[in-house]
Amino acid sequence: MNNKTPFNFALGLLIVLALPFPVSAQDRPVTAPPAVDAKTEAVVNHAIDVLGGSNYLNVKTTVGRGFFTAFQDGKSQLPARFVDYIAYPDHERTEFVSLGIRVVQTNTGETGWVFDGATKTLSDMKAPQVAEFKHSMRTSVENLLRGWWKKDGATLSYAGRREAGVGKRNETVRLTYPDGFWIEYEFGAKDGLPAKVIYKRTRKKADSDETVELSEEDRLGKPITVQGITAPWVVDHYINGVQTSRISYETLEYNQPLPDSLFAKPANIKALK
């Protein structure tokens, strides 16, 4: 559920096809990402500082509780209570309860599983679901501020200052991957807090093979500080300017021990905790 990641298969494939013979990972030249200009670095460092500095960067796990609300045609639907367990960088388990029905979706990097309480089924995640998780990690503020993007050859640049309401401006940085996908992150020019995450992507229409480009945006609000770490407690998601969901936290806890068994797929439904 996390609004978080990043694998660049296309670039790796191009490198392999260009080589006259196979090479091991140790033999491949390591290319350092381009240097980040001073202005961009200042925006990112300011954001890290206001979110907690070393406290923020040293977060290993997060447990969040609250409500997830889907929107249809811009109108809110029945909220579902959730608890979200995250172990950085790529483990997440989210449990939803709505109308007494429990749903659990868990991702562990390249794999995942889902329990559907309505149908009483336990199944592995399909490839599109895993891809959606990776996409959410790739677009997350954590990906930017923790520097995970560097290992994928992305570049970071300054995209300018933007209007953000009466008397308010946002500083914007753009993260661009070798495959052409980009994400823009807006931070308050004065307070340095993350305000927006913006990107575009192409999806197939539900009733045909035709594709359409969608503009997506996360608007981050209600910053609250807990354990020396500041985070937005409200995340509103928009597609083509129409709201599609809201995440509203009631509590956030950091660095709580999370056992590996929490993310492991249970042997059967009876073993699900």
Image (spheres, rainbow, N blue to C red):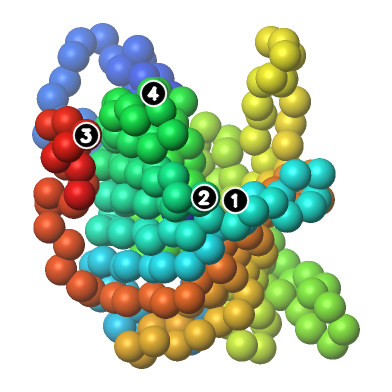
| Helix, strand or loop at mark 4 | loop
Query: Do we see residue 12 in this rendering?
Result: yes
N-terminal of the pair, mark 1 or mark 2, is 2
Q: Above or below — where is 27 with respect to 42?
A: above
Q: Above or below — where is 30 with respect to 41?
A: above
- Snapshot quadrant of residue 122: top left
* Foreground pick, 91 / 167: 91
- Residue that carries the numbered disc 3 in the rendered image: 269
Residue at 69% x, 10% y is 209
Position of residue 27 measured from the top left corner of the image (x, y, whole percent): 14, 30
Q: Is mark 1 in CB contact (under 8 Å) with mark 2?
A: no
Separation of residues labelled 4 and 3 (CA atoms): 19 Å
- Residue that carries the numbered disc 4 in the rendered image: 126
Question: Which mark is drawn over residue 99?
Answer: 2
Q: Is mark 2 in CB contact (under 8 Å) with mark 3?
A: no
Separation of residues labelled 4 and 2 (CA atoms): 26 Å
Disc 4 packing (10 Å; few <14; some 14–19; many ≥20): few
N-terminal of the pair, mark 1 or mark 4, is 4
How many numbered discs sit on the rendered protein?
Answer: 4
Residue at 39% x, 46% y is 102
Name the amino acid, label 2.
Answer: Leu
N-terminal of the pair, mark 4 or mark 3, is 4
Residue at 24% x, 67% y is 60
* Foreground pick, 196 / 97: 97
* Foreground pick, 138 / 19: 138
Separation of residues labelled 2 and 3 (CA atoms): 20 Å
Name the amino acid, label 4.
Answer: Lys
Name the amino acid, label 1.
Answer: Ile
Name the amino acid, label 3.
Answer: Ile
